[in-house]
Image: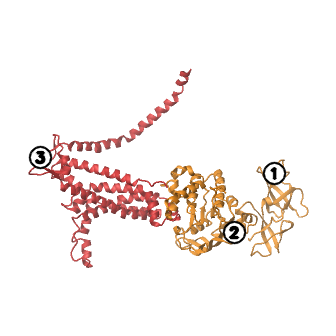
Amino acid sequence: MSDMALNTPPEPGALELEEAQQDNRSRWLLALPAMVIIGCFATLPLLVMLVYAFLTPGDYGNVVWKFSTDGWVSVLLQRDIFDDTLMWADAHLSIFWRSLRLSLITTILTLIFGVPTAWFIATRPREKRQFWLFLVTVPFWTNLLVRTIAIQELIRSEGVINLILLKIGIIDEPIQMMFTDFAIGFGMTYVYLPLMVLPVYAAVDKLDFRLVEAAHDLYAGRWTAFRRVILPLIKPGIIAGSILVFIPCLGAYVTPRVLGGGKNLMFGNLIELQFGAGRNWPLGAALSLTLMAIVMVALIYYVRVTSREREDV
Amino acid sequence: MSETALKTRPAATESETAVDVIGISKLFGSAQEIRALDDVSVAIRKNEFFTLLGPSGCGKTTLLRVIAGFEPPTMGALHLGGRDISRLAPNQRPINTVFQNYALFPHMSVANNIAFGLEMLGKPKNDIRDKVTEMLQLVRMEELRSRRTSEISGGQQQRVALARALAPQPEVLLLDEPLSALDLKLRKEMQIELKRLQSETGLTFIFVTHDQEEALTMSDRIAVMNAGKILQVGSPREIYAHPSERFVANFIGESNFLNAHLSGNRVTLEAGGGTYQAVAPEGVADGKVSVLVRPEHASARPGEAAGEELAATVETVVYSGDATTLHLRLKTEEPLKIKMPNGPEQSTAFGEGDSAAVTIAPGAVTVLKD
C-alpha cells in the first residue's frame, strides 16, 4: 500500500522537472554564441599568454618551446650584466608606480569632474537630458588618436594654452607640459571622463530626491546630506564609473605614447615594448598577467572598502 | 504612573499658537502664473491635531512644504512659537515631516533611520541608542530594529517613518497623507495609532489629507482648502454641521442645498414649511440665500404634509443596511435626500411616487455664503 502511494505521485513532478530541464537547455543555447566568443577570444588568448610567460624568448621575437621562469623574474628583478646578481628592476617599478599613480589620479579627477556633471544632467528636465547626454558622447565620434593629438596641440610649448598665458603675461616662457605625467593625466582624464559621467548619471537618475528632502528635514546640512544619503545611494554608479576608468587607465597605451613621449612609459607601453623592440614575449606575457592581477586585487579591495556599511546604533 | 508611560506635556491653553501662517502666497511657473497658495493665514495651536483637508491640487501639500521649509513662500511670513522662521532652511527648523511615501533611507537599517535626526543634532551616542529604543517601543517595532527598511511591510514602514520624525522631538510634526498608501484595515488602525501618539507626545500635528472621514475622526481642528485658499477652519463638528460655504459642505459628507430667504436670524425655505433659526456667516445679507440641510438631519413620514412639515414626493428608496436613503422631490422641484436609520423591523413604508411629509430638525438649517 505504502509503496503504491509513494509510486503514484511522482508523475506530475517528473513532468515539471523535464520542463525545467528543457527551459534550462534553451537558456544555455541562448548563451552559447556569447560563450563561444568569450572562449575563443578571451579565455584562449589568456591561456596562450599563460603558456608563453613560462617559455624562453626567441632571438627575433616569438618564443622558443623551452620552460623558463625568466619572464616572471624579469617583471620585478633584473640581472646585472657583469656579475649576474639579481636586483630590483627600477625601471619597471617606476613604470608600475607611474601607472598606478596616474590611473588613481585620473579616476579621482574624473570623479571630481564627472559626478557634478552627471548630477547636472540628471537634474535637468527630462526632455533636455537627451541633449546633454548626447554632448557627453560626442568625443566618441572621433578616433582616440586624433583627439589625443588635439590635446597635444593645446598643451605643447607653442600650443594654445601657452600662447594665451604668454600673451596676457602670466608667464614669461612656455610651460613644459608635453611629455610629462601631467600631460598623460590630463589626456586620460579627458578621454575617460564620459565613462565616469554615464554610470553616475544612471545612478543619480534613479535617486529619489524625496530622500534628500528627508535628510534636510532631519537636520542634515547640504554636505552631510550628500555624504550620508546621496553618496551611499549613487555608490553603485560611482563604483561602476571608477572601474570603467581605472582599468583602461592602467593599461592605457595611446595616450601615454602620444602625450608622455618615450620616457614616461606606462604599463601598456612597457608590455608593447616587450612584444616589439624588446623581443621578449615571455616577459610581455608575464607583465600582462601581472597587470591583470593588480587590477583584480585593486578591484576587490575597492569593492570591499566601498561596500562597508555603518553599524547599527 | 508606570515607568514606561511617556511624559506628556501639560496641555496648553487655547491661545498659545504654535505655527502662525501669516498671509502666505506661493506662486509657481516660469511667469509665476500658478497660484498654489493665495494669501493663506491660519494660526495652529500648540498640542493640537490640525488637519489640512482638500481635494488634490488645493494647495494643502504646498502649505505643508512651506511650513517644512522645502518651498520658500513668495509672500507672507511664517512664525513658530512667535519667532519668524520664513527664511530658515529645513534643517534649521525644529519641525519634522512624515512623508507621503515615507522616504525612509533604503541603505540604512530601521534603527539607523530613526537615529539619523538625532545624529545630525549631534546627540551623544548613548542618548541616541536610548532614544531609538524608546521610539521603537512607542511605535511597537522593537523586534525589527536591525531590519532593512526594504524588508518590512508598508504599515511597518509607516511606523518607522513616524518614529524617525518623532525622535528628534520636534516642536511640530508634519504628516503628508501618511495613510494613503495603506489598505483600509491598516489605515483604520494607524488612525487610532496616530491619535494615540499625538496625545502621548503632546506634539502639534499638522496632518494633510484628502480623506474627509480621516479628517473628521482624527482632528481637533480642520482647515478646508480649495484653489489655494483656506475656506473654513473649525472643529470637525463645526465643519460638518455648519460649513460656511457650498464647497465645504459638498466636500464633507452628503448635502442638500435649498433655496431660502433670510431675514435676521430666521430662514424660510422656498419649498414651504416653517421658519428656522439659523446664524448667517459674515457677509451674508438678508434676502435670497442658499441653505444646507444634512440628509440625516431631516426625517420623513408617509402622507400629506401638515403644519410646519414640507410636502414632497418619493422618487427612489435606497436601502443600505444601517440606514435608508429617500430621494425626494419638493414642490419647488428641488431634490432632497433624507437618510434615516433602520430599526430592527422593516422600517420603510415608502414606495416610489408616494407623498411624504418632511420634518427638518431644529438647528439643521445652515446658511451658506454662496
In the rendered image, residue B341, in percent from the top left (x then y), is placed at 80, 53
Q: Secondary structure at mark 1?
A: loop
Q: Quadrant of residue A31?
A: top left
Same chain for the residues at labels 1 and 2, yes or no? yes
Q: What is the count of numbered marks? A: 3
Q: Which chain is red?
A: A
Colour of chain B in the rendered structure image: orange
In this view of the protein, which residue sits in the foreground, B161 or A242?
Answer: B161
For mark 2, does the 10 Å Cα neighbourhood hold few (<14), some (14 to 19), or many (20 or more) residues?
many
- Please name the amino acid that badge 2 sits on: Val
Q: Look at the numbered discs 1 and 2 and tell me whether their residues touch, using CB distance below 8 Å.
A: no
Q: Which residue is mark 2?
A: B233
Q: Can you identify the residue that label 1 sits on?
A: B342
Horizontal side, residue B7 vs residue A261: left or right: right
Image marks 1 and 3: residues in contact by CB distance under 8 Å: no
Seen from the viewer's position, the closer of residues A190 and A306 is: A306
Please report, as a chain letter, where disc 3 is located: A
The quarter of the picture where residue A120 lies is bottom left
Residue that protrudes farthest toward the left in the picture: A82
- Residue in the picture at 32% in, 56% down: A246
Mark 3 residue type: Asp
Residue A116: horizontal and vertical position, in percent?
A: 40, 64
Mark drawn on residue B97: none
Q: What residue is shown with label 3?
A: A59
Instruction: Give the x, y percent position of residue B36.
Output: 59, 69
Residue A22, position as x, y percentages in the image = 44, 34
Q: Along the horizontal axis of the image, is A233 left or right of A44?
A: right
Furthest residue in direction right, as rendered: B307
